């Protein structure tokens, strides 16, 4: 099975190679309407849905990110109207739950929650995150989160002050739950190399599409499983 994985689109909708499924780790909506719920509704139902329908894959699994205001308050009825029906149910939205891809049986768990900074969405204290991440099932195939874990350079602002901005609670959860893969974004210039950090069994990578200047310079990650 061929997967495409990316994150932090901020309205940039990249060309995707033929694959079985696309995973998006949050910060999807156009940067200029991120706090405008009504315009976000229209964007997801029209621009995003059309892009999804044109993609050369069967499934698109998404989570929200700290800039996806509309996804932070979306109801089941709104999911149906603005995401599911317009994409002919090609999209699966995860918010601290999981799905199973029918053709492959791969299990994917998605969590949008991030450490608190500023006045954004899906943000929690590390103590709250510890409880949120405790619900991740053990031994799933793929974990997609918006925040990176506090591991290595995955959460380091490499194009800036080299500050570490990931979640210690997520790092602990990954060590305990041992998903086969973990993908994330949020810190645009974090380490994009797919690797298994020392002391872990999980292959991980930052998959942000944009750099710290919001330019789409990083490639989409393709993975054969």
Image (cartoon, rainbow, N blue to C red):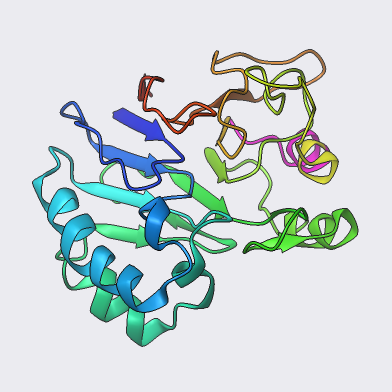
Query: Is 59 above or below relative to 104?
Result: below
Kindly identify the residue that appears in the image at 74 percent across and 54 percent down: 133
Which quadrant of the view contains residue 181?
top right
* Residue 164 locus on image (x, y percent): 79, 28
Which residues lie in the magenta part?
A: 172-180
Query: Is 175 above or below relative to 91?
Result: above
Query: Is 85 above or below relative to 221?
Result: below
Whether residue 100 appears in this view of the structure is: no
Indicate yes or no whether the magenta region holds residue 80.
no
Kindly identify the residue that appears in the image at 26 percent across and 41 percent down: 13
Kindly identify the residue that appears in the image at 31 percent across and 72 percent down: 39
* Residue 123 locus on image (x, y percent): 71, 60
In the image, taking residue 204 as reference, residue 99 lies left or right, namely left
What residue occupies the far bottom of the structure in this picture? 77
Quadrant in which the C terminus is drawn:
top left
Whether residue 50 appears in this view of the structure is: yes
Which quadrant of the view contains residue 43?
bottom left
Query: Is 90 above or below relative to 160?
Result: below
Which quadrant of the view contains residue 182?
top right
Decide which of 192, 178 is in the foreground and name it.
Answer: 192
* Residue 213 locus on image (x, y percent): 49, 29
Kindly identify the residue that appears in the image at 46 percent across and 40 percent down: 8
* Residue 159 locus on image (x, y percent): 62, 18
Quadrant in which the N terminus is drawn:
top left
Decide which of 20, 190 is in the foreground and name it.
Answer: 190
In the image, taking residue 48 as reference, residue 200 lies left or right, namely right
């Amino acid at each position: 099975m061929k997967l495409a994985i990316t994150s932090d689109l901020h309205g940039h909708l990249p060309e995707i190679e033929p694959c079985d499924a696309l995973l998006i780790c949050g910060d999807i909506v156009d940067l200029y309407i991120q706090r405008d719920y009504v315009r976000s509704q229209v964007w997801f139902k029209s621009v995003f849905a059309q892009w999804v329908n044109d993609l050369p894959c069967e499934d698109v699994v998404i989570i929200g990110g700290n800039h996806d205001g509309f996804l932070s308050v979306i109801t089941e009825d709104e999911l149906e109207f603005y995401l599911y029906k317009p994409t002919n149910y090609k999209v699966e939205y995860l918010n601290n739950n999981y799905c199973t891809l029918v053709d492959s049986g791969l299990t994917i768990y998605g969590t949008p929650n991030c450490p608190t900074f500023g006045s954004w969405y899906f943000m929690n204290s590390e103590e709250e995150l510890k409880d949120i991440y405790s619900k991740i099932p053990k031994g799933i195939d793929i974990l997609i989160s918006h925040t990176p874990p506090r591991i290595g350079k995955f959460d380091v602002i490499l194009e800036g002050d080299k500050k570490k901005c990931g979640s210690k609670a997520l790092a602990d959860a990954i060590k305990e739950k041992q998903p086969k893969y973990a993908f994330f974004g949020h810190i645009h210039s974090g380490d994009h190399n797919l690797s298994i950090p020392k002391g872990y069994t999980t292959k991980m990578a930052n998959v942000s599409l944009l750099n710290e200047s919001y330019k789409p310079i990083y490639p989409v990650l393709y993975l054969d499983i």
